Amino acid sequence: MTESYLNARTPTTLRPPAPPKRWTKPRVIGHVLVGIWAALIIGLLFYLYTAWNPELIQKYGPTYWSGLKTTIGLVGSSIILGALISIPVALGRMSKNWFASSVAYAYVYFFRGTPLIAQVFLIYYGVGSFKTQLEAVGLWVFFREAWYCALVSFALNTAAYQAEILRGAIRSVSLGQWEGAASLGISKFVTFWKVILPQALIVALRPYGNEVILMIKGSAIVALITVYDLMGYTRLAYSRTFDFQAYLWAAIIYLILVEILRHIWDWMERRITRHLIR
Amino acid sequence: MRITKRLALAISAAALAFTMGAAHAEDALKLTIASEGAYPPFNNLTPDGKLEGFDIDIGNALCAEMKAQCTWVSQDWDGMIPALQAGKFDAIIASMSITPERLEKVDFSKKYYNTPPAIAVPKDSAIKDITPEALKGKTLGVQASTSHSNFAQAKYSGSELKMYPTADEYKLDISNGRIDAVMDDVIVLGQWLDSDAGACCKLLGTIEPDVSIHGPGAGVTVKKGNTALADKFTAAIAAIRKNGKYKEINDKYFKIDVYGGED
């Protein structure tokens, strides 16, 4: 092991000369495809340049901004709330107690198996028909607001996915880690918190990123229950101008949002895998 | 080889027959007309998914008058004009108001009806009248992308505006007590209030329409520049007004003449 490591570092290694780069079929196809993509992007930028309409931007820009704030606020709070709910659900899924495990299983089964839009409608309009009962227990004030209904349904939905991510990640940490900690006399809670979870989070990080991105895009349905997010205001702007620019700008904003998120996730990955880099 | 040749021959023969058939059928005007199907009594879907209502009956009468073969399709309200522009259908008969905003993108026939907007509130509501002052601070529900929502945005800025994808949803929400008032066409609200579903609410009053926002009434929508078709529809509307067919359909649905004043 040590020897080969040293060998790799010796500068005297002779490499054969690089083979001549020939225009093979895949290489030609690759260049053509990149060319097509480049042309599409240039075309898009050119279209945006020619279609630039300060009047539209002035009129609808602020609504896009407020829509973006709604999207970020709603997705951010539902992801956090969902993360909190997902912990007991994940523990339930891994529990040996048949009752806890079947309740958690049913929860995940339902929320992953039905469309988000159905869940939003069920909570917004379904709960609305129990107004008198809800008023009696003082919950109507909460469910009256469309925003809270959206928050609840999004959080419940994402919690099911997050619970599965968490469960998979915890299971991926080998049992030996538990046993090793136990042999040192460390309590189960501390073992989980200090040994298992940090290792599990490395595995869970990318799936969590996917879940956040899916929620950002999934939240676009919320305008159906009168919460106007970025997509809602886009549709409104389109329905008054019939200008496809409206959707193009929305796509660009979503793209930027996801790109920022990707960078944050890259940074987080570098941070929590420092000990793995030699 | 022989088989493929024969197959190719058969296919080309079939294609030829098909194009000839299509060319023959072009003698009669063939139109595809779209409506929404969530705006009773003007347009609505039957339980088995067919379109029905005043718009549909008027459309069929106009087609009969123009001797056109018409097929109906239902289309989401929000996508109605983009789909027309994309050529998915030839005309829209969906109680679409002839607004200045829409006239920039599409053309219309002359109106085939004109009824005023109105506001409905829950029966125990404390709101006294339909003025913007009386509705200040209240939540007002409207259907998004309609002349009513534009009007509410312009004139009822003191109220909190809630925009719903279709009329069905604001009806649900006012009977749930989530919103304080709804604004829509008086006939649409009236029909709903007369039904069991509208038992929660009452009509507060009608609003004087603003021509610069509501336009002169609802017309048949056609693609921008297709004035030939729009004129055909305008002539057909005048014809069914004259020969009593309009009155027959009108009386089937309404107690009053929804056509409004002559313009």
Image: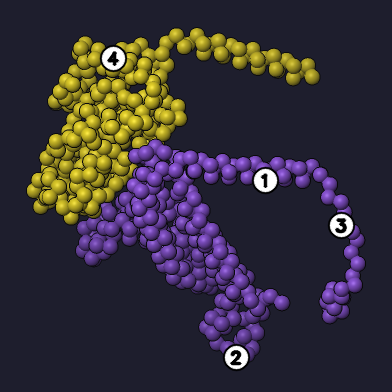
Task: Locate residue B168, reporting x and y percent.
Answer: 28, 41
Palette colour of chain A: purple
Would you name the residue on which mark 3 appears? Answer: A18
Q: From the image, state whether disc 2 or disc 4 is nearer to you.
A: 4
Would you name the residue on which mark 1 appears? Answer: A34
Q: Chain of mark 4?
A: B
Type of amino acid at the residue the image marks with label 2: Gly
Q: Is residue A259 above or below residue A241?
A: below
Is the residue marked by circle 1 packed among few (<14), some (14-19), or many (20+) residues within 10 Å? few
Which chain comes out yellow in the rendered image? Answer: B
How many numbered marks have been drawn onto this rendered protein structure?
4
Question: Disc 1 and disc 4: Cα gap in Å?
Answer: 55 Å
Q: Quick one: label 1 or label 2, which is nearer the N terminus? A: 1
Q: Quick one: label 1 or label 3, which is nearer the N terminus? A: 3
Q: From the image, state whether disc 1 or disc 2 is nearer to you.
A: 1
Would you name the residue on which mark 2 appears? Answer: A185
For the residue pair B174 and A49, the one nearer the viewer reads as A49
Q: Chain of mark 2?
A: A
Question: Disc 2 and disc 4: Cα gap in Å?
Answer: 91 Å
Q: Which mark is residue B11?
A: none
Q: From the image, state whether disc 1 or disc 4 is nearer to you.
A: 1
- For the point 85% across and 78% down, the residue is A6
Question: Disc 1 and disc 3: Cα gap in Å?
Answer: 25 Å
